[in-house]
Image: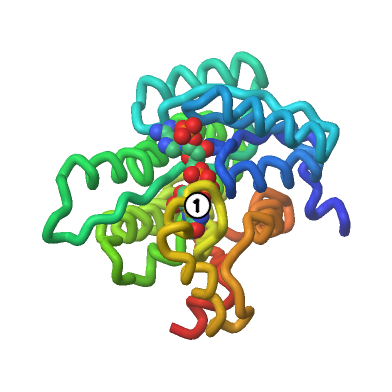
Amino acid sequence: MKELFTLEGKNAIVIGGAGGIGAAIAEAFAFYGADVSIASRKMENLLQTKDNIKKSTGKDVSVYTVDASKEESIIALVDTVLADKDHIDILVNSQGYNVKYHITELPVEIMEGMMNVNVIGIAMLCKHFGKHMKDRGYGRIINVSSTRGSRACLGGNASYCTTKGALDMLTRTLACDLGPEVTVNAIGPTNTVTPMMEGLIKEHPEILHLGDDKPLQRIGRVEDCMGPAVFLASEAAGFVTGQILYVDGGMTAIG
Ligand SMILES: NC(=O)c1ccc[n+]([C@@H]2O[C@H](COP(=O)([O-])OP(=O)(O)OC[C@H]3O[C@@H](n4cnc5c(N)ncnc54)[C@H](OP(=O)(O)O)[C@@H]3O)[C@@H](O)[C@H]2O)c1
């Protein structure tokens, strides 16, 4: 039964793999035996994450730069990774960001930029890696969405919530397009302490208490996404597709 969760012999790539949640998922995949690649724009951050994962797991991680908002950069990444690794079994899309504006002041370029990274770029990564996986007859895709894909909130989050709602539906639709060979699921974290949140927490330290009235009475840590990602990437989740697995301490269960 232990083999249900092993990732031995699998090639995985985590886009946004130098970010808080992406790096945690990459580390967990390495620990569970996968050959792991990570990709994002800044090589310096990728190399730092490679170093951290080597220290914690003893495993070497491959690093690639990509601008995941541009299809030509995504195609170049897919070509390079497949030339290096022969094939990819597991794709995680953990890239994404949030710039907050009240809808009455929202510049169109801000919303377009977030749509490009949080939705369209992910669709293009799933298009190119997904075709490769489907042709090969096996694949697992995990998109990092958010509780904000199904729960609106105050505070200038119209663009972000819209991108995550779109990503949830993209996930379900891709499960239809890429099955039966490829499963496509999403993880929906709640507020999680990562570099993306640091600035916001400095301005609004009350964020650290947003989980106090939720069932598990705290906000998220990056480690909370490790187990759910390993599960969705493994044979254990072979009959699970088109789902959003909330990693939210029970937040969406109660409201
Ligand atoms: N932290 C939270 O509270 C929270 C809660 C729910 C959901 N999420 C979601 O979880 C995901 C990861 O968030 P995080 O908190 O781990 O953020 P993070 O630490 O800021 O990491 C984001 C990663 O995305 C990469 N990225 C951004 N734009 C990119 C682009 N155009 N091309 C390639 N890579 C790009 C960044 O690297 P470069 O800048 O070097 O490219 C970075 O590695 C996001 O989708 C976020 O919306 C986060």
Choose between 101 and 113: the one closer to the eye. Answer: 101
Q: Can residue 122 be seen from the camera position used here?
A: yes
Residue at the spot x=54%, y=76% of the render?
A: 211
Residue at the spot x=58%, y=36% of the render?
A: 18
254 above or below 68? below
Residue 44 image-quadrant placement: top right
Q: Residue 26 in the image: x percent, y percent? A: 67, 41
Q: Can residue 94 be seen from the camera position used here?
A: no
Relative to 168, is 2 on the left or the right? right
Choose between 203 and 56: the one closer to the eye. Answer: 203
Judging from the image, what secondary structure is the residue with disc 1 in? Answer: helix
Q: Residue 98 in the image: x percent, y percent? A: 36, 51
242 above or below 10? below
**Label 1: how many Cα within 10 Å (few below 14, some 14–19, many 20+):** few
Pick the quarter of the image with the C terminus: bottom left
Mark 1 residue's CB less than 8 Å from ligand 1:
no
Q: Residue 84 in the image: x percent, y percent? A: 65, 16
Relative to 92, is 35 on the left or the right? right
**Location of mark 1 (residue):** 198
Residue at the spot x=73%, y=35% of the render?
A: 52
